[in-house]
């Protein structure tokens, strides 16, 4: 009979700190990187690519990949109970890995996992005949968009300019506003906690890096005031930047 072992030694070497997110990136014996998260009752280990648990679903790397293939085969296809359960699992796994990437400052990885989650939300809602189940995920869309916007802005700040970081926040805020508008709740947009935090981040970047109006903000202002020649020049400059 194989001897069972406990994890006391491992856990004692990495104490849980409830005041922070306890995350590290480590390399296994086989040379692959894995993420480890210390929680109050143990350690979670997540793969850095594919499904965080390292598994597959019906020979596909992720549930999202599987559902995309299924919908392409049959646009009228609806989800089974088992598939809904697997969607739930993938949502939760990606949430854990997304916050780990943010803590580790791997911002582009956090964006990728947020995009995966958003596509899974769209697809599972389209393929589900249970509005309540689909709504249980949709209610978290602003939270996922908040993480995505944070990650994209900090990635832009790290690799490009503070102006591009500010613009990334503006773009994210407009996407979140669209969510509120689609649910007839735009009146609550400005007072939403996540929106307030993104605005605070944007204004702190403006202050710390002396960022005035971004090029896109200047363009919007020019269009609003019917300064069409200026708007054309600004639009050309935006296009030039995007093609770099």
Image (cartoon, rainbow, N blue to C red):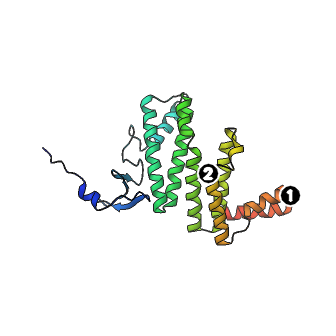
**Image vertical order of residue 93 relative to residue 86, above or below:** below
Viewer-proximal residue among 77 and 2: 2
Q: Quick check: 232 left or right of 47?
A: right
Q: Is residue 142 among what the camera can see?
A: yes
- How busy is the neighbourhood of tag 1: few (under 14 within 10 Å), some, or many (20 plus)? few
Q: Quick check: 218 left or right of 29?
A: right
Residue 82 image-quadrant placement: top left
Residue 181 pos. (x, y %):
70, 42
Q: Quadrant of the C terminus?
A: bottom right
Q: Could you tell me which residue is drawn at 59 percent across and 66 percent down?
A: 157
Q: Could you tell me which residue is drawn at 33 percent across and 60 percent down?
A: 15
The residue indicated by pointer 2 is: 193
Residue 37 pos. (x, y %):
38, 55
Of tags 1 and 2, the one toward the viewer is: 2
Mark 2, secondary structure of its residue: helix
Residue 136 pos. (x, y %):
53, 36
Count of all numbered marks drawn on residues in the image: 2
The residue indicated by pointer 1 is: 225
**Image vertical order of residue 23 relative to residue 85, above or below:** below
**Image vertical order of residue 200 relative to residue 189, above or below:** below
Viewer-proximal residue among 174 and 236: 174
Residue 108 pos. (x, y %):
52, 59
Residue 165 image-quadrant placement: bottom right
- How busy is the neighbourhood of tag 2: few (under 14 within 10 Å), some, or many (20 plus)? few
Q: Could you tell me which residue is drawn at 80 percent across and 64 percent down?
A: 233
Mark 1, secondary structure of its residue: loop
């Amino acid at each position: 009979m194989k001897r069972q072992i406990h994890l006391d030694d491992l856990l004692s070497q990495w104490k849980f700190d409830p005041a922070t997110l306890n995350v590290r990136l480590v390399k296994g014996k086989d040379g692959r990187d894995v993420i480890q998260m210390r929680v109050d009752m143990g350690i979670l280990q997540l793969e850095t690519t594919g499904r965080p648990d390292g598994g597959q679903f019906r020979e596909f790397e992720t549930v999202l990949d599987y559902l995309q293939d299924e919908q392409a085969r049959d646009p009228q296809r609806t989800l089974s109970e088992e598939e809904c359960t697997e969607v739930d699992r993938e949502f939760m796994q990606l949430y854990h890995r997304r916050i780990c990437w943010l803590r580790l400052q791997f911002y582009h990885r956090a964006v990728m996992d947020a995009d995966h989650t958003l596509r899974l939300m769209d697809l599972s809602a389209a393929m589900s005949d249970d509005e309540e189940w689909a709504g249980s995920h949709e209610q978290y869309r602003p939270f996922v968009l908040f993480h995505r916007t944070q990650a994209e802005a900090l990635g832009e700040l790290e690799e490009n300019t503070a102006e591009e970081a500010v613009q990334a926040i503006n773009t994210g805020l407009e996407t979140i506003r669209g969510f509120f508008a689609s649910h007839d709740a735009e009146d609550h947009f400005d007072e939403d906690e996540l929106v307030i935090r993104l605005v605070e981040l944007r204004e702190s970047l403006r202050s710390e890096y002396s960022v005035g109006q971004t090029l896109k903000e200047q363009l919007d202002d020019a269009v609003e005031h019917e300064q069409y020649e200026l708007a054309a020049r600004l639009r050309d400059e935006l296009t030039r930047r995007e093609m770099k």
